[in-house]
Amino acid sequence: MSSGAESAGPPHGGDRPGPRLDLDDQLEGAARRLRELARAKDRLQGLLSAVLAIGGDLDLPAVLHRIVTTAMDLADARYGALGVLAPSGDCLEQFITAGLTQEERAALAGIDFPHGRGVLGHLIHHPEPLRVDDIPSHPASVGFPPGHPPMRTLLGVAVTVRGEIYGDLYLSERRDGRPFDQADEEVVRALAGAAGIAIENARLFGYMRDSAEQFQRLLLPTLPDLAPFSGAAVYRTAAEPASVGGDWYDAVVLPDRACAAVIGDVVGHDLHAAAAMAQARNMLRALLYDRRTPPSSVLTQLDRTVHAITDLPVTTACLARIEPVGDGWALHWSSAGHLPPLVLAPDGTARYLRAEPGIPLGVDPGIDRPDHTRPLPAGATVLLFSDGLVEHPDHPIDERLDALAALAAAHAHQPLDDLVRTLADRHPSDGHDDMAILAVRIPAHGG
């Protein structure tokens, strides 16, 4: 029994290496799966970060470029592009690229962007994901234009917005030199789904912003002929979607030869603020024509009127009269909690007319308002503006006012239309509030 049992056992342990090899294979397999899981986790985290990145902007061109660069990061691709389909759906009307060096872009100077022929066109007409290991050998390939960098591999995925194909996302040349694989395709497809939502949000934002700006402009007046004065105004909407604001302005030459100018800002950014702005402006113009009274009295009457007949939100305003005085001019103004007027002298120097501002409209109609008067030289320019032109949360208001004065002084001799556009384009604010600017220039001769 003993010898039989012994003979039945493994002789000299000759079969023992087999289990050790099996265990090594299992450990290697487990390690490989762990590495794959780690890569999948990293890729998922990258995808989530990419989705947050492309959803963090509402400017459509910026969103489209961000989609391309984040897709390149996810697939570790050297080149990327997004082709936007034309309304006909059979060609590209826009082509956003990323990854090209300055030298490569220079080599392509003068060459029109791809409109959807060749392999790119294949994806337009067959919108399933496309992976190509060798572009030149693909049946649809038509070659590259002169100066185009060499590209061999391609991954293409359609981008859909509200159920319709918006365009196609293209990636080329993985940095490790290998063709794009199934994992690349899956993560880029997931990104394309999020990209469709980001594009729709940006398009909706643009539509609402444009609609708000158009509505606001309809409420604001076209300046009448102010001869012998000249005038110009500009309005810019806030950076927020559908932010119909309460900024307003007006100017008119009165029967006594004075030019009345007003700037105002109704608190709030909604339809109620816009409607209140229109009411206040219309009532103020009627009061200006009806009374040759000081600006303080006109503002007081406006405050009492709107308090009695409507629910006007708190409103700041500055009402000024440029009046002939002997052979010269004077500025006679009153402020309802508004920023001071800025005067540009004919020699280009800029000076704020700082004085007691008074309280805003809609607070207490019974409180007296101050009047102020300063002489003005012939040829001077009076600038009235809303706080959206200068407010910035990271800077004191006096610093921003100084920056505006320096900017205005540097461009003081521009025609008024150019001057107000320059100030609006290069404003020292953070741009998150609507802004209005009104400029009135005094004749170069006496009153």
Image (cartoon, rainbow, N blue to C red):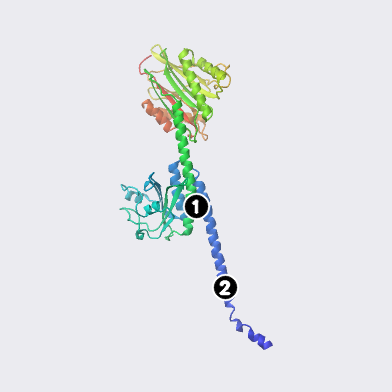
Single out the mark in the foreground, 1 or 2. 1
Task: Give the quadrant of the N terminus.
Answer: bottom right
Q: Indicate the quadrant where residue 173 lies.
A: bottom left
Label 2 crowd (10 A; few <14 / some 14-19 / many >=20): few
Locate residue 295, reporting x and y percent: 49, 16
105 or 93, nearer to the observer: 93
Q: Is residue 344 visible?
A: no
Residue highlighted by disc 1: 190
Residue highlighted by disc 2: 22
Numbered tag placed on residue 44 in the rendering: none
Circle 1: element type: helix
111 or 210, nearer to the observer: 210
356 or 150, nearer to the observer: 150
Q: Amino acid at mark 1?
A: Ala
Label 1 crowd (10 A; few <14 / some 14-19 / many >=20): some
Q: Amino acid at mark 2?
A: Asp
Locate residue 156, reporting x and y percent: 42, 54
Q: Earlier in the sequence, mark 1 or mark 2?
A: 2
Q: What's the residue at 52%, 26% (across, down)?
A: 266
